Amino acid sequence: MLKHFLTILDIPRDEARQVLLRAKEMKDNNVRTDLLDGKVLLMIFDKASTRTRVSFEVGVRQLGGEPVFIASKDSQLGRSEPLKDAARVLTRYADGLIVRTFGQDKLETLVEYGNIPVVNALTDEYHPCQIMADVLTMYERTPNLEEIKVAWVGDGNNMAHSFINGAATFGYELALACPEGYKPDNAILENARSLGAKITLTEDPAEAVAGAHYVHTDVWASMGQEEEQKKREAAFAGFMVDDALMGKAAPDAKFMHCLPAHRGEEVSESVFEGPASIVWDQAENRLHMQKTILEWIYKD
Ligand code: CP
Ligand code: NVA
């Protein structure tokens, strides 16, 4: 059966633990396989990327496959060729699509009109590969994820939405602090709660961070929102993760950020470069987790 990875919820909850264990094994044993031997995975990116692009290109090769990168602006997609037309063409050339784009609906169009697996490499709504890797990073330190509190401080954006889905899948407690006007999508939140997720939402960063084992944040203006930077700086005043805020978290709490980071905005220089920061492990785990997600898609 054709598998896609558009959100974390695409991985059934009874398989999620195994995916996590396998990602740890991928990392610890530096696993290389020939699973994707003879397969070409197209990477279509509408937005900039360092980590996602490189970790997927490397990961596909480590599984024996061949990545082909297409910047949309250099293709006919950048000249308004309908996505549903491109989907029907590309599905005849390749064995999978790894896509970074704007609306999640674009991924759904690729699924509908193509006949090959589609992987979400970030949309405006979700960043599931990142949060799967972040869960691995937390799991490495605290294997019992159901006993940890995860704090999200900042925008109710693609990262926040995937953390919300992750709470439903992995059982960690999630406390979100988002300013008025920048809260996560209520339907995503309520869906996760209906699946049993323990999630609170406040406008007070100190309340969300109180006793948290992991404190996450992200840029205040995501890709595509650059012109809102000034307005967002005003709205997010008081949301910087600094030493004072980290001091309210659990003893030995860790700071995490998907990167790239804006020091002096969403995180202070001292927290970002300090002993609580585990951002480089977090970035490394993109590679191991994405190889595992590809294995989950292609192994059957
Ligand atoms: N964290 C992340 O997705 O980074 P890139 O934008 O560099 O891919
Ligand atoms: N929220 C950010 C994440 C970047 C990895 C963005 O969408 O730009």
Image: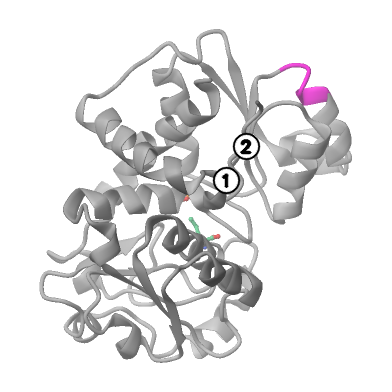
Residue visible at 83% across and 40% down in the picture: 83
**Quadrant position of residue 67:** top right
Identify the mark nearer the N-term, 2 or 1: 2
The residue segment tinted magenta is 89-93
Q: Is residue 57 above or below residue 48?
A: above
Q: Is residue 244 above or below residue 275?
A: below
Residue visible at 21% across and 24% down in the picture: 29
Q: Amino acid at mark 2?
A: His
Residue 7 visible in image: yes
The CB of the residue at mark 1 lies under 8 Å from ligand 1? no
* Residue 203: mark in rendering: none
In the image, 288 versus 50, the foreground residue is 288
What residue would you read off at disc 2? Answer: 4
> Dominant secondary structure of the magenta stretch?
loop
What residue would you read off at disc 1? Answer: 10
Residue 92 magenta-drawn?
A: yes
